[in-house]
Image: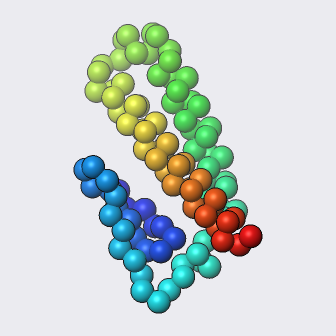
Amino acid sequence: MILYRLTGWSFKVSGGEVFVSVPGRDITEDIDTTKLIKEMEYLEGFMIKLKTKLDNKDFSDRAPEDVVNKEIKKWNDCWDRYDTIDKTLKYLNKKNG
């Protein structure tokens, strides 16, 4: 998974994350915080739905293990994206005073 970050490109590898910077460019100017906030709100709602599904004993007992694992992966992926956006917004707020 590749995530566009504040100073370049970032991608996850097993055990961590690797950054590749974009020299001579401050891409923070290109970031639309309104879109990030809307995406966070969407992710919150989606994670709540996933959590409700995963907490449903009937679902977890009757669904095949691979289906349950896919739902868990979706939740984890959403959380990673949500966390990235949260950190980005905090950085931008700090940078812009």
* Residue farthest toward the left in the current orientation of the protein: 14
Left or right: residue 23 versus residue 86 is left
Q: Quadrant of residue 31?
A: bottom right
Q: With respect to residue 22, does 89 lie above or below?
A: above
Residue 19: x %, y % from top left: 36, 68
Residue 67: x %, y % from top left: 33, 27
- Residue in the foreground of this view, choosing between 19 and 32: 19
Residue 40: x %, y % from top left: 62, 50
Q: Quadrant of the C terminus?
A: bottom right
Q: Quadrant of residue 63?
A: top left
Q: How many marks?
A: 0
Image colouring: rainbow
- The structure residue drawn at horizontal position 50% and vertical position 18%, both measured from the top left corner, is 55
Q: With respect to residue 31, does 78 lie above or below?
A: above
Q: Quadrant of the N terminus?
A: bottom left
Left or right: residue 59 versus residue 87 is left
Q: With respect to residue 81, does 62 lie above or below?
A: above
